[in-house]
Image (tube, rainbow, N blue to C red):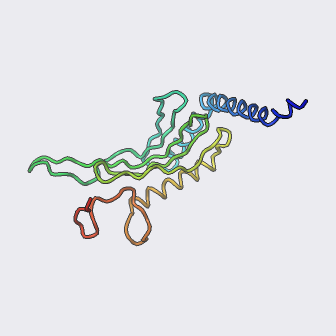
Amino acid sequence: MQVNSQFFNLQRKVRQYEEVLQNTRSYRESWKTETREQIRQTLQNMVDETGLKASVEQRADIENLEAIVLTLGQSKSGMYQKVSDDLQRHLIKHNGALVYQQLFNGKIIVLLNYPFIENYGKPRPPKTIAIYRPEELREPYFIRHMEEFMQEVTNWEDYDDDEPNQRIGFQLNFGADGGEKPE
């Protein structure tokens, strides 16, 4: 009896570990059978209902790390580099995305990818909105995620210096006087 009591905590930790592994298998199966399609349909419905110019895409490069992405696409930024008198190289703007991606353990992370302009500073890192077990994802959460996404991309697009601590989605290449920043 003495030996068993020494292993009580260890046995409990082993059972907990086995339960977590089973949860991962269960969450991954749920993604394949219902969660992936639920996310896709819910996002597509929001796009259709709001008239937002966006597309909903599935990214499946790695099994069990798939993602459903609501993307605002890419466009010309309106800025370009003059290569010669009659040739211009446009800077491409990535307009932002809302990402629902499987994690290694089958849970779902919701990320906000900020807009950025290629070759113009550094893109801002994605913002983690939340992590969910598949059964926790409900329509009110999707609406809240979309509202936050729209607020963040609107703030990025409407950046100015009225709010002193507001960060734009990239670090500017130029100093306060308009000249290049010293390295």
**Residue at image x 50%, y 51%?**
127
Q: In which quarter of the image is residue 170?
A: bottom left
Image quadrant for the C terminus? bottom left
Figure label count: 0
**Residue at image x 63%, y 46%?**
139
Is residue 136 placed above or below 30 in the rendered structure? Answer: below
Q: Is residue 51 visible?
A: no
Q: Where is residue 86 in the image (x, y as percent from the top left)?
A: 10, 48
Q: Position of residue 135 (x, y in %)?
A: 68, 39
Q: Is residue 57 visible?
A: yes
Q: Where is residue 105 in the image (x, y as percent from the top left)?
A: 61, 34
Q: Nearer the viewer, residue 120 or 35?
A: 120
| Left or right: residue 54 compared with residue 118 | right
**Residue at image x 24%, y 67%?**
178
Residue at the extreme front of the image, as rendered: 2
| Left or right: residue 149 compared with residue 135 | left
Image quadrant for the N terminus? top right
Is residue 27 placed above or below 149 in the rendered structure? Answer: above
Residue at the extreme right of the image, as rendered: 1
Q: Where is residue 157 in the image (x, y as percent from the top left)?
A: 38, 59
**Residue at image x 43%, y 59%?**
154
